[in-house]
Image: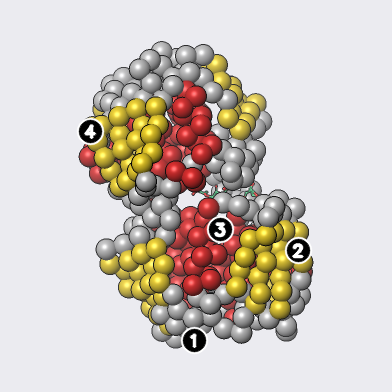
Amino acid sequence: MDEFLIEGQQPLNGTIEINGSKNSGLPILIATLLTDEECVINKVPDLRDIQTTFQLLKYLGKSVEYKNHTVTIKSDKPLKYAAPYELVKQMRASILVAGPLLARLKKTQVPLPGGCAIGLRPIDIHLKGFEEFGAKTTNVRGDILISVDKLVPTRFRMEFPSVGATENLIMCATLMPGKTILSGVAKEPEIDDLMDFLNKMGANVKKHEPDEIIIEGKPSLGGATHTLIPDRIETGTFLIAGAITGGNITLANCRVDHLKSVIDVLEYSGAKISADGDTISVSGPKDRPRPVNVNTLPHPGFPTDLQAPWMSYMCIAKGKSKIEEDIFENRFIHTAELARMGANILVDGKTALIEGVESLNGASVMASDIRGGAALVVATLCAKGQSVVQRSYHIDRGYEKIEDKLSKLGARITRQKSK
Ligand code: EPZ
């Protein structure tokens, strides 16, 4: 197992490039199951979850060739309808194969993903949607079997704007002849990216404000070439890392419009942000940051995926701040590790109260999920002395070679084998 060794208190400086988005890459790779024709996707980050998706696609009947962040996906064998537990348990987004497979084969079987470190994460909204499309869902010894004679386009209102359910149901509806109207949908930029890709494949998917997506189903879809949008969560994590170290960094390949809520609070904290085309620069506050409260919300609200790195930043703010986590019920696991570094945080249900301290101290800490792990790296960058962030494999699920990018910005960070 690997870990990161970090020597803190080194202001970050310089320029790096942001990768393509993991969270639009996963559904878009899976959407290739909707066609037998060749698809080419560019700027696909080299991450564990992406590699797991490649394995899943190969298992289901695709050939996958990945080189220099471009992946070419072709049909290799007839599609299988069932996804294996070995892969699904590694990555919850595997549930997204259900929509395309149901649309193409009228039957799919996917192991229930189960809970994970950040919450229970049920898939009831996905299943309710498939049932509204006329499918029957049955639990067969921990797998969910979904089958249908004929999918029926309908109007379905989601009780919560789930990102995954929106993606799953859109993909399924692209091959259901007739008009499907999904309302109460998620509005994350990754949904727009998936819709763009599907429309390039010949689908007819449109947004209808305020919260609807209308899909006119087609008998079949073709191949397409697409470039993934920049990863807004990687961008946000580096912006916070630049700010917390009092550094001055520039990030290339960004979408400023995807990060408005994050830029607003960073500016309020005293950081200076400037944007020019697809680059964003941040200069950290001269003094300790000003405390700023955030609550996580569906897009365009403050993203839950940046809640943990934001908490690290607020740990050294000049005063008290509050974070409310309104998306996941258990996404504060990193607080106990931050406390080991001298942070002063009180968690009560979905609220965390943070009393900023003068500085954090280096310590040995352990990552337990992607973003919580990234938050620990961010915190150690500004901490006094040496730190070790154990279980770096969690961080590798969402950040490609984070240590190389941080080193390029002047951080003293190395990857080593755990003792
Ligand atoms: C996506 O997960 C992202 N993952 C997550 O990124 C992100 O945190 C999350 O959206 C919220 O923005 C990918 O895109 C691959 P949801 P997803 O369905 O689709 C509840 C990261 O670090 N819910 O919008 O699983 C659920 O339990 C991650 O990159 C139901 O109750 O998120 C959660 O509390 C991890 N029933 C909330 O909704 C359902 O059927 C949001 O979940 C579905 C969801």
Judge left or right: residue 378 versus residue 321. left
Q: Are marks 2 and 3 in contact (CB under 8 Å)?
A: no
- Circle number at residue 78: 1
Q: CA distance from mark 1 to mark 4?
A: 50 Å
Disc on res. 410:
4
Instruction: Compute the Cα span from label 4 to label 2.
Output: 50 Å
Residue with the mark numbered 3: 191
For label 2, the residue is 156
Give the position of the C terminus as an image quadrant: top left
The residues tagged by marks 4 and 3 sit, at their Cα atoms, a distance apart of 35 Å
Helix, strand, or loop for circle 2?
strand
Q: Residues within 10 Å of mark 3 (few under 14, many from 20)?
A: many
Nearer the observer, 333 or 188: 188
- Residue 415 occupies quadrant: top left
Give whichever of discs 1 and 4 has the lower sequence position: 1
- Which of the two discs, 1 and 2, labels the residue nearer the N terminus? 1
Q: Residue 214 location in percent, x, y?
A: 67, 66
- Please tell me how crowded label 2 is: few (under 14), some (14-19), or many (20+) other residues with Cα within 10 Å: some
